[in-house]
Amino acid sequence: MKRIYLAVILLICAQAATAQFYKTDTARGFDRSRLMVGGSFGAGFGDYTLVNISPIIGYRFSPMFAAGVALNAQLSWEKLRGYDGEIYARYNYNMFGGGLWGRFYPIPQLFLQAQPEYNSIGEKFRDYAPDPPVTTKTRYGAPALLLGGGYAQPIGMGNSAFVIMILYDVLQDERSPYRNRPVISAGVNVGF
């Protein structure tokens, strides 16, 4: 319990120390320093291999609002093994898509996010048990509406920040790639 209190105190102190993180001038027109570029990258290797690249680009319209475009690319390969260690099937999965995102910052480092997106998903299953092996391929589209929030911790000089967030697909379409689970991600936004 003491750790939770310590974490909350540290977050409040970090928020107070960086309250002037973003420019608050009222100049009109495009300001390059308000651009946000970032995203996340993930990878895991083994019998189940996963590569995920999710870049974003956006613009901080005011201290309270930011919006932009997000892209998704996820590839995975899985080897299914029997008790003897032999591979009896392979499963490949790919997802490509993207959408828009918007953030509302009620406090300089805490934000609420909405991200409607559309993903094209391809699946391939190869079963080696029958002779000859059987391959099944499917491709379908899946809409999603991710809602949630996160925390942006400023790093270094300028508008760069480490971002961690939790989102949930509220549409829960039966083809949703998020499968009724929260999406927890961490990444870096780099300001110019």
Image: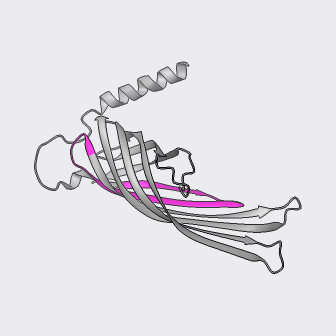
Q: Is residue 127 above or below residue 100?
A: below
Q: Which residues are magenta?
A: 38-65
Q: How is the image coloured?
A: one colour
Question: In front: 122, or 14?
Answer: 122
Image location of residue 118, percent across then percent down: 43, 61
**Among all residues in the image, which is located at the extreme right?**
84
Magenta-colored stretch includes residue 16: no
Task: From the viewer's side, name the closer residue of 11 and 50.
Answer: 50
Asked whether 158 or 140 is in front, the reply is: 140
Q: Quadrant of the N terminus?
A: top right
Numbered label tally: 0
Q: Quadrant of residue 76?
A: bottom right
Q: Is residue 124 left or right of residue 187?
A: right
Q: Specify the farthest residue to the top.
A: 2
Relative side of 15 to 121, left or right? left
Q: Position of residue 67 (x, y in %)?
A: 29, 51
Q: Quadrant of residue 97?
A: bottom left
Predominant secondary structure in magenta?
strand
Specify whether residue 61 is painted magenta.
yes
| Percent position of residue 61, x then y | 21, 48
Q: Is residue 75 above or below residue 103?
A: below
Q: Residue at x 60, y 60 (%)?
A: 50
Q: Quadrant of the C terminus?
A: bottom left
Can residue 133 be seen by looking at this rendering?
A: yes
* Horizontal side, residue 50 vs residue 147: left or right: right
Q: Please give the name of the residue rendered at 22% of the width and 52% of the height, measured from the top-left corner.
A: 33
Name the residue: 31% across, 27% down. Answer: 16
Q: Position of residue 38 (x, y in %)?
A: 38, 55
